[in-house]
Image: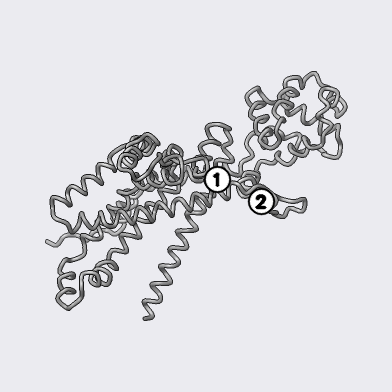
């Protein structure tokens, strides 16, 4: 008796069921946070939700816009008044006190331009009205303007008249990440080679040393480097006793300290991928190359190294992506000029409560990563096409 054939529809249904849970987790834990971050970067916050009447009022009629503003203030509760005042203050220093002072007495103020001026003569200054009008839309590009130094002129065109401090910080982040990646690969490649090709006891010792670093908390490892590299630390004490230096070196709270500590933290992420690729290379290839007359250096450069570049690329890319988002290590071991973009994102979230600006910087960082990965993918595609033609 022959078995009945399986229905393809049942297999497809089982595949859909098996994929549903990981797909739901992917959407919930990855896509939704990213989409929320992007929406926050262009969301005008309380300004877009509270200044509704003011936004719709005739701006040429000063009495009408004053009445609309007072009506919006009276419609807000205390929490929204504080949030709106804080966001206005981010655009114009000193606006917070004026807005809160007016909002608390809005019910007793005559709803005209003269009434507002009599209450506080700062309302006669057009700049306050311009700031509210420019930021009363539900969506705004001002966070990206502040982050990139670009501004919209009166005709709606982007101009480079702003401060580009965050562009410089983004560039600094990329430079530090590249430096850490190069140093990590220079140290990680010999370690991976030792684990793969050295004597078993020595290889096991190196592997355990790498994994011990991997298993230790990032905060503990970073604090250890602060202790080691400080002016009275073990490194400076050793250099002074051996006579290499006559006074302590500044090894911490600068670029050197940040790169050293970040390299130590990220080293396992470079060693493990390179080591896994090295283990797939047959040792017989080395013996064959030597038997054909090639020396050890030529064998390494022409036979062994090219086959390990895939692991180098994976390890380097992993280290680079992780280094871009580092916060704890550079903030504890770097100086004021060595802080990366994640430090400022955290400052906007924890100190100034400017979620829009933090999201804009995060989107810029995400965009830089996607751009670099796209360039890398395009380079690999072009290289594969050239090899195919050859």
Query: Does 292 sit above or below residue 3?
Result: below
Query: Does 100 sit above or below residue 42?
Result: above
* Residue with the most extreme bottom position: 390
- The answer to which of 388 and 294 lies nearer the viewer is 294
**x and y, in percent, of residue 200 in the image:** 13, 53
**x and y, in percent, of residue 319 in the image:** 38, 51
Q: How many marks?
A: 2
Query: Dividing the picture into quarters, in which one does residue 159 lie?
Result: bottom right
Determine crowd level at label 2: few under 14, some 14-19, many 20+ residues with C-alpha closer than 10 A: some
**x and y, in percent, of residue 354 in the image:** 58, 36
Query: What number is the disc on residue 150?
Result: 2
- The answer to which of 373 and 265 lies nearer the viewer is 265
Query: Does 35 sit above or below residue 196?
Result: above
Image quadrant holding the N terminus, namely: bottom left
Query: What number is the disc on residue 340?
Result: none
Label 2 secondary element: loop
Label 1 secondary element: helix
Image quadrant holding the C terminus, namely: bottom left
Q: Residue at 43% across / 37% down in the picture?
A: 332
Report if the CB atoms under discs 2 and 1 are less than 8 Å apart: no
Determine crowd level at label 1: few under 14, some 14-19, many 20+ residues with C-alpha closer than 10 A: many
User: Which residue bears the numbered disc 1?
Assistant: 361
- Cα distance in 3D space between marks 2 and 1: 14 Å
Q: Residue at 57% across / 50% down in the picture?
A: 168
Q: Locate residue 349 relative to residue 100 in the image: left or right.
A: left
User: Nearer the N terminus, badge 2 or badge 1?
Assistant: 2
Query: Dividing the picture into quarters, in which one does residue 91 lie?
Result: top right
Q: Locate residue 76 relative to residue 295 in the image: left or right.
A: right
């Amino acid at each position: 008796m022959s078995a009945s054939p399986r229905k393809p529809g049942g297999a497809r249904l089982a595949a859909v069921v098996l994929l549903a849970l990981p797909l739901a987790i992917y959407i919930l834990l990855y896509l939704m946070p990213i989409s929320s971050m992007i929406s926050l970067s262009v969301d005008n916050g309380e300004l877009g939700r509270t200044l509704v009447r003011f936004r719709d009022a005739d701006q040429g009629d000063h009495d009408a816009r004053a009445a609309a503003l007072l009506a919006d203030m009276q419609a807000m509760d205390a929490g929204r008044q504080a949030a709106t005042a804080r966001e206005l203050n981010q655009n114009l220093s000193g606006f917070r006190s004026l807005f809160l002072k007016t909002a608390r007495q809005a019910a007793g103020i005559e709803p005209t331009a003269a009434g507002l001026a009599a209450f506080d003569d700062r309302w006669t200054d057009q700049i306050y009205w311009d700031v509210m009008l420019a930021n009363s839309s539900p969506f705004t590009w001002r966070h990206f303007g502040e982050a990139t130094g670009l501004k919209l002129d009166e005709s709606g065109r982007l101009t480079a008249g702003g401060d580009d401090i965050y562009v410089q910080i983004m560039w600094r982040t990329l430079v530090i990440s590249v430096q850490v990646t190069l140093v990590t690969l220079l140290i990680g490649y010999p370690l991976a080679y030792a684990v793969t090709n050295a004597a078993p006891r020595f290889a096991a010792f190196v592997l355990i040393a790498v994994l011990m670093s991997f298993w230790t908390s990032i905060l503990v490892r970073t604090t250890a480097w602060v202790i080691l590299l400080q002016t009275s630390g073990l490194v400076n004490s050793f250099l002074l006793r051996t006579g290499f230096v006559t006074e302590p070196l500044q090894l911490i709270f600068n670029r050197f300290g940040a790169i050293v500590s970040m390299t130590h933290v990220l080293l396992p992420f470079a060693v493990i991928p390179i080591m896994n690729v090295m283990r797939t290379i047959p040792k017989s290839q080395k013996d064959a190359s030597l038997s054909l007359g090639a020396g050890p250096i030529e064998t390494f450069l022409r036979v062994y190294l090219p086959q390990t570049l895939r692991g180098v690329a994976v390890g380097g890319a992993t280290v680079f992506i992780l280094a871009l988002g580092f916060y704890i290590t550079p903030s504890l071991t770097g100086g004021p000029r060595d802080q990366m973009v994640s430090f400022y994102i955290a400052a906007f979230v924890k100190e100034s409560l400017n979620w829009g600006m933090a999201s804009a910087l995060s989107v810029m960082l995400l965009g830089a990563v996607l751009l670099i990965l796209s360039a890398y993918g395009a380079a690999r595609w072009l290289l594969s096409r050239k090899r195919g033609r050859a």
